[in-house]
Amino acid sequence: MHHYLISFLIFSPLVAAFVGLLIPAKSESSFRYLTLIANAFQITVLFFMLGSYENASALQFVEQQSWITIGLGTWGTLKATYFVGVDGLSFPLIILSVFIMCIATISSWTVKQNVKGYFILLLILNASIIGSFTALDFLLFYLFFEFMLLPMFFLIAIWGGPRREYASIKFFLYTLLGSIFILIVMIGLYVSVHDPSSSGTLVHTFNLLHMSEPVNFISNSILDPNNPWQIGPYNGRLWAFLLLFIGFAIKLPMVPLHTWLPDAHVEASTPISVILAALLLKIGGYGLARIAYPIFPEAALYFGWFVGLMGVISIIYGALNAMASKDLKRLIAYSSVSHMGFVLLGIASLTAEGVTGSVYQMFSHGIISAMLFLLAGVLYDRTHDRMINTYSGLSSKMKSYTTMVLIAFFASLGLPGFSGFIAEIMVFLGAFRSNSATGVLPESFAIISTLGLILGAAYYLWTLQRMFFGPFNIKGHISEDQIFDLTKREYIMLVPLAAATLCFGIFPQPMLSVIDPFARHLTEFVLTTGKNLTLNL
Amino acid sequence: MQSNITYSTFFEICLLLSVALPLASFIVSFAISEKYSWAVSITAPLLLLVSALSSSVVFFSLHDDQPFSIAWNWFVISGHPLTAGLLLNNLSATMLLVVTFISFLIHFYSIGYMAGDSSIRKYFAMLGLFTFSMLMIVLADNLLLLFVGWELVGFSSYMLIGHWKEKPAAARAAKKAFILNRIGDAGFLVGLMLLWTHQGSFALNQIGLTDAMAAWQTAASLCIFCGVVGKSAQFPLLTWLPDAMEGPTPVSALIHAATMVAAGVYLVIRTFALFTPIALDVVAVVGIITALIGAFAALGQYDIKKILAYSTISQLGLMVTALGAGASDAAFLHLFTHAFFKACLFLAAGAVIHALHHAQLQAHAHFDVQDVRNLGGLRKKLPVVFIVFILSGSSLAGLPFFSGFLSKDAILTALISWAGADFSWQWLVVGGAFTVTFLTVLYTFKMIWYIFFGSEKKTSELSISAPPAVMQVPLFTLALASLWIMVSWNPFVHTRWMNPAMEHSWSVTLFSIVWVIMALATAYFSREKSFYADVLFNAFYVDRLTDWMTKKIGLKVPAITITLDKKWIDGFIHATAYVQVLIAHVTGWIDRAFVDGTVNGMASFVRGVGSVTRTFQNGKIQLYIFWSIFTIIIFLIWTLL
Amino acid sequence: MTLTSFMFYFFEIVAALSAVALALSRNVFYGALLLIVCLLALAGIYVLAFAEFIAVTQILIYAGGILVVIIFGIMLTTKISEKPLAVEHTYLLSGILAAGGCFGLLIYVLSKEYFLTTGVQQLPSSPVNGIQTIGVSMFSKYVLPFEVAGILLLISLVGASVVASTIKSKKE
Amino acid sequence: MTGLYDQLESVRASFGFFIPEMILCSAIIILLIAGLIKQDASKLLTVLSFLTFSTSLLTLVLYWPLEDIPVNIFNGMLRADNFSAYLKILIDVGGLLTVLMTWRYQKQQHLSEYYALIVTVVLGAHLLVMSMNFVTVFIALELISISSYILTGFSFSKSGAEGSQKYFLFGSVASAVMLYGFTFLYGMTGSFEFASPVFVNALINNQSTLLLVAGSMALAGFLYKMAAAPLHPWAPDVYEAAPMPVVAFFSVVPKLAGLGILTKFTLALNLFGQSVHDWQFVICLVSMISLTVGNFSALLQKRPKRLMAYSSIAQSGFLLVGVAAFLPGGINFMLFYATVYLLVNFLVFVYLQYFEAAGFETLESFAGVGRQLVWPCVFLLMGFIALTGLPPTAGFTAKLFIFSSTWEAYQLNGKSILLWLLVFGLLNTVISLFYYLKIPFYAFVKKAESNPITNNQTFENFFGLTLVLVILVLFFNPDLLMRWINKINFAL
Amino acid sequence: MFPVEHFLFLAALLFSVGLLIIITKRNTIMVLLGIELLLNASNLNLVAFNQLWPASVDGQMFVLFVIIVAVCEAAVGLAIVLQVYQYYQTSVTDSISELKE
């Protein structure tokens, strides 16, 4: 039974999507319930997994089925497998995905237009997100990774705001561009890596675990660590790392590859923004930690400084831009850029606490950004205006809403007691300790990044001051009765998120003990393997 | 859960209660539904009362006994377990008592002061949260937990300053307070990182165990001091505190006078082992600058709460100076006494404002009730408040027989012994400290004179009623607490109760008595001066000197410091804010123009290439042929060359 | 210079000149006639290159067949529109560029090549053999292309008729 | 030189390997005659041509095992091997699907000639991929070309005539240039059999610049047939002019035929790696130019047919990527790509025909159709996704495979042009997305104008579903096909 | 036997002139004539090269096939030209360019 839990997670939404295809489009509410049932089923499965998950660095719930095996004549054999499993990196993200998808479903309840298509796309998106977080075979990962794009594209492009076409195409192109970089490296990797378990013929494998063992590289292949082959200033492996880094950094998003994000967020409808911010961005960080770092450890050490620098730049730049934003959603989007910078910084530090912190930050940002976008959506649903200047003194009309906004804002700016604090502090500690422990990042990175905290406080509190405090006033043609407090459905979505961010902020240990073994394993692996591999520069 | 077993279960329960009940008050206040919001003003003070009582149990059973610690595992950072624990010693137990006690009194006072407020639930909830987080600072056994409390008091302070959120000034002040605090906290955080990197632990009892007076310790202690600068409103981050007076007065009393702002001083005492001599020198200089600025500024103020706020800054500066001199006991003693008399002063000022405000509402008169120039002669109309004000004001001024005298005495003693026999820059600090004590007397009594003496000005037509009993009880309690008895039996020796080990010198005591009396006289005569100018001018050169001082220094310097404060420090911070916003706009523009522009440029480039490749497709078959052939020829020529 | 070599160079010059004249000609009809001249000259060259059968075919099919068809085409298209046969030149620069480039390139490449060294075995023994060999190989080695050529002819005739039939139907 | 008897014997023995072609030949005659006899024989003709292609396919599949060892037939004019057999299968499938498409909208005039011409093109394509001799190459190519010129005009409209004429002029010049190249190769080697030892040895001994010029000229003809740059300009105009089934047919059958002969020819010119001229570089360059021209020009197109024309140019570039590796593996992957391309292309064209019949002539006119015609648009979307090369379609697998072979080739010889090709080709995928998603974008995202369509879509949906399933299955289990393709042992 | 180069140069000239005609002449029929020139250039080459390999008549055979193809092309080509003429009332190549971007 336990052996198929992940497959249940991945395929239950697909099954639901298939069932949905068979239901006539007229019975609109059935799609909502269908999706909700799928989510509920996933949550049930998740509880089974929670029950038997062990806190160790080993992969768990592993399933491996042969999938594609093709003889290539003189080349040997190409082998891709259906290989999934979870560990301390993916498990938090799986938990996050399952719950956020459920909340997104509830948030989608008000979708009126083309309900069938919407929910089927949502279900497909669900499956592919979970798939990307669990895949341990590069081809499988890539499949799910790309498979996310189209549903997302249409979800933005059809159900989005006025400039949705521009935003959706921008989103698609950016991420596709990133995935092309990843594809190049994937091709290079599987051509260069052989499966050590097979005897006789050469088996080219997509197995990520095999790829991370330097001995499995075929000698004199371009990505072979011992191959002195230079392409321009770097050898193949450094280039490959850079390509992967760019590919995932687009998704993350990292400054200056981030500009798709504000547009996509502003134009996407609320549930889609939630999924985008809470889950899709995480794939970037996940990919770095799962693929780029373990497979190219020496490149990770070599470019660690650069990665960390980009993280710092993202933190500060994102925050500055958030401050200048006039649109609430754009502000939140830029704050996401800033917060995902911490993920980069944490991973780059290559200390256990830094990596733990950045995984925790992904988890925590998932919760908080979901909440923020839901809240922005609440306002938008009522007035169809997201401009900060439009409002002032909202707190007197929308008390509970203001409370929720306060919670979300303060959680996002890293107030202790909320999950963001734990994540950020660990990233800071790791980034600072990095110089003495690993020598990758200078201390100044951590110190400069604290500026992000100040700026974070500045833009959130300024927004609070402008929108919620002071005498009540609204500009434009919004009538006062359009503004009313939270509805029950909105409570159902927001309260669990608020509770979760509090809970994980006060009691981080359960989640940390899930992440910690992975973080230690990763840092240890990257440091030892990376230092053993010679850099042919 | 690990704890030493020398203490009884009752003690532990009391400790737990004293910490948990404020939190419970926070939760209960939110849990009670809007309809029954009046109930909050009963539950919250009640819970705090129990908390204060149990903390007094804790205090008395622990005092002068073994330190007590208890810890729970909180989380593990890469193998280093991090605890959430309480560490009680004399220091923290005293602080525990002070916080819960004053907090209770202020809760009690607030019943009257905040009656009828629309969001009273939020008010009490935030007071509860504040008290809880303050206790977290007080009791935390490691710096991370302390930092958590540190940030949370910032948050609750934010909420309470901005309590009347319809007032734009309040919202602005709240934001300013939080952001300036954050700037300090960022430094604190860097200090934490340094500690973590070099010590691998945040535990307070491990701080400074590494005997090396290493550079990192200087750095770490200065970083932590950054946090102190923010929270305790030290130079240059002091401007938020006067602005924070936009909040309800009880809040100013609790947070911005008695407890939170003192937390900085407390933090330095807690982490004293970390501070290297160089760091301490910096601390002393910052402290004395702050103290002087605060004192002079207070002289130039006319708003009651602003005077008190600057006075608080000045007193905090004094404490920090003492810390810099290595006299953490003296600093703490002053913290302790200051908490009571300053809370009392604020509450009394609040009572004045409250009473006048109510009277004003009845009479439909409109003037600024906080401006001392509008007041005068109130001693007849508000006798209770007058007595209380005189008592606590005397304590602030450092008159003998008041607690303030003793604690200031302790600080001055410590400073003099720190400065040593030979003249050095440290004597400047000492001189500064004496100037501050002198000025304190001046502004305190000038304020009292303005409010309670002389003839009634704009208040004359108002029918002012005495504050309700709920407000009077805390006033009296705190006024009594500003007597010398709080510190020691002997009104001239400060080394009885709190810290028997503290150094005491009769010469200093005597000198400070003389000094205070001189100041008092100056105050008195300077007050007289406005009425009897000729007599004073002729009688005493001292008078002329003080006149000159009050005129030239006492008015000019505050004006300068005010401009410094308003224009330069605040201005600088505003300017940085402007610059920040400007930079933000610039980066926003860069984002649109370049980063996005590059992408859009790429898109248009792609389109451009498309239209170029397309122009060959003009429908003329002969040109098609030409281009095809020509391409091949060009290719061949290129390869052959 | 022997008669044959005179003949050869004469034909070469005629062919070259007529081709150039064709390029310069502004009249379609003259153009067709010039092409006939050129093709006949080529036929003469073929004879001198021991390809009598080709030469005959050239005269019969090209000069006699294709060009007659072309002249019919000229007449058909000019008659309807009743415009002069004059033809203007376009894209002169492009044409000269392509043709000149091509010519230069070919001359350059060819002048570096020495074909005689590669493998001339012997002179052909007798001209009779030529035609016979052609005949034999047409039905042995080249039987497949030959048959396919048949299909090609069939299908082009069918195709041309289809195209032509639409012309008629349009007219009606 | 072999004796006459041997030659005749060879001809006799060759017929066994020539059954599909003979079927096609007789089909041409039968179709023409049937058209003459019966006035309105559209059903009969369709059935006949359907049967033609099915039997041809059937024989090909049945005789597949026979052709493990390459056999030279008709005195070295042709060669029967499994490489060409596989391409022939693809070509026949293309013919079959074209017949189906034509049958869907039975409004074609001159149906018997039409089918005869289609069969002729298929015959020519068969011959072309089997050809080992310049004579057959030329004849077969002309067979395809001349039939194609006429087929282009089968819309019998003004634009049809114009397209036909342009195609004719361009094609004639291209094949004349190719022929001119052939003559030089003949002059240098004395042989037309470009894979024969005589030919190769002669070239190895004389690798002059003329070889480069002649080879490039010869390649021009093949590239023209493939609609690859720089011999592509005819394609958009012709595609726009021709009827939809013919366009679909053109974008697959002549292309694959050209690809087959190009592969053989370039590998022969490579002289077993002893060539001093870098033909790999040439192919890479051609591929990159085709990708660029195709993709970039397609961006601004407003009509689906023209868009697909540029798409077909770009796809030629992708197909050439497989050739450019100069590895047997690469050629096998190229065949996989060709298979997927064939299926996907027909998937797209079937729906484009459907929409054209319903009056959707420009991309804008597709606005909002996605709501009314969900399934056609979804299947069309799947087709475009596969053309772009995104998972989970076999288009992705195909791209993955061909670029893997590029990587492998780069790893073997380290020519930086291959790396450029890899990066360039994959980045072109991003650009191709711009236009491939245009129709789905209009269909699903843009707001609907009122366009009630009542066309029966059962045929299309059945057809679409089948093909979509095939491309999905080929993604999830490419081994189903690769198992067969891997048996192909490409050898000269 | 004459030097092969002399044939080849003439062929090259014919080929180039053919190209020139094809590109520059505005009348479709003239373009057809140019194509004939191209084919004849190849024929000349083939005949000339056949002299180098006198043991077989491969080159001459090819010439025959080229001529056959030329016939087919001429037939189809003229039919198409006439058809176009029908629609456009002109055989001026430039004018026949409705299919374009």
Image (spheres, rainbow, N blue to C red):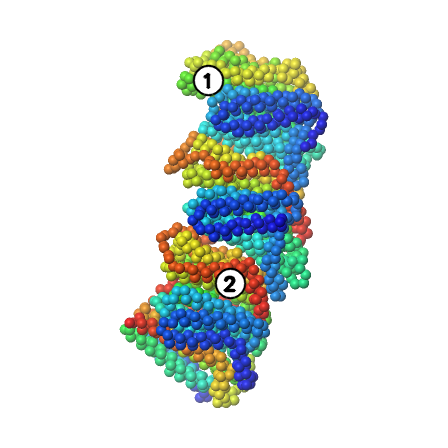
Q: Which subunit holds the residue at mark 1? A: B
Residue at (53%, 66%) from the top-left corner? D335
Q: Amino acid at mark 2?
A: Val
Depth check: give the residue in front, B275 or A103.
A103
Depth check: give the residue in front, A130 or B396.
A130
Q: CA distance from mark 2 to mark 1?
A: 88 Å
Instruction: Judge the density around disc 2: few (<14), some (14-19), many (≥20) Cα neighbours within 10 Å.
Output: many
Residue situated furthest left in the rendering = C82
The secondary element bearing badge 1 is classed as helix
Q: Amino acid at mark 1?
A: Leu
Depth check: give the residue in front, B213 or D61.
D61
Mark nearer the viewer, 2 or 1: 2
Q: Same chain for the residues at labels 2 and 1, yes or no? A: no
Position of the C terminus of chain E by quadrant: bottom left
* Residue D34 x, y percent position in the rendering: 40, 75
Is residue A164 in view?
no
Q: Which mark is residue B356?
A: 1
What residue did someone put label 2 on? Answer: D340
Residue at (68%, 52%) from the top-left corner? A532
Badge 2 vs badge 1, beta-carbon distance below 8 Å: no
